Amino acid sequence: MRLRVLAVTLLIAFLTVAPGTHTAWASTPVATDPPPTVNPFLPEERGLGDCISAVPKPGCGSEERGGWHQYLVAIALVGGLTFVGWRIVSGVRKSPNRSTH
């Protein structure tokens, strides 16, 4: 019985999202919207394949990257990790069941 219910559920799910059924609902982009490939972090004169990879090619940076915001986040992360490490070390030192070998 469960297999039949699962099969009917999957069949209904696949039929409701069949290709071509949602074309009437597709929205047209507004003329003021930028194209989906516009990104302030990527240069406009280079192709997307040049700059989006594990090792981007030189010249793919932008002025939008970095700055004091990025340094503030890095300092907060290092501070948080230092605090967590300090709490672990102090908790271990205060532990009464600590071995003294």
Image (tube, rainbow, N blue to C red):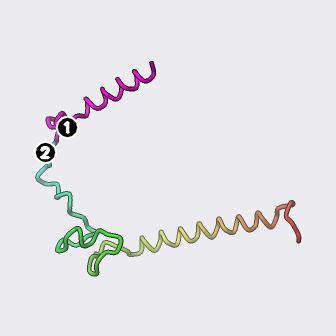
Discs 2, 1 touching: Cβ within 8 Å: no
Where is mark 2, residue-wise? 28
Measuring 21% from the left and 63% from the top, which residue is drawn there? 38
Instruction: Determine whether 37 is above or below 54 in the image.
Output: above
Give the quadrant of residue 39.
bottom left
Q: Crowding near pointer 2: few (<14 within 10 Å), some, many (20+)? A: few
Instruction: Give the residue number, with chain letter if any, for mark 1.
Output: 19
Which element carries disc 2, helix, strand or loop? Answer: loop
Vertical side of 23 occupied by 73: above or below = below
Q: Amino acid at mark 2?
A: Thr
Q: Is residue 101 left or right of residue 46?
A: right
Task: Give whichever of 77, 97 is nearer the camera.
Answer: 97
Q: Position of residue 63 (x, y in %)?
A: 29, 76
Q: Which residues are magenta?
A: 1-26
Report the residue at 28% width, 32% height from top: 14
Q: CA distance from mark 2 to mark 1?
A: 18 Å
Residue visible at 31% across and 75% down?
56
Q: Tell me: residue 100, above or below residue 30.
A: below
Name, please, the residue furthest toward the left: 31
> Camera-side residue: 12 or 84?
12
Q: Where is residue 45, by image quadrant?
A: bottom left
Three-letter code, disc 1 = Pro
Farthest-out residue, right: 101
Q: Position of residue 20 (x, y in %)?
A: 16, 36
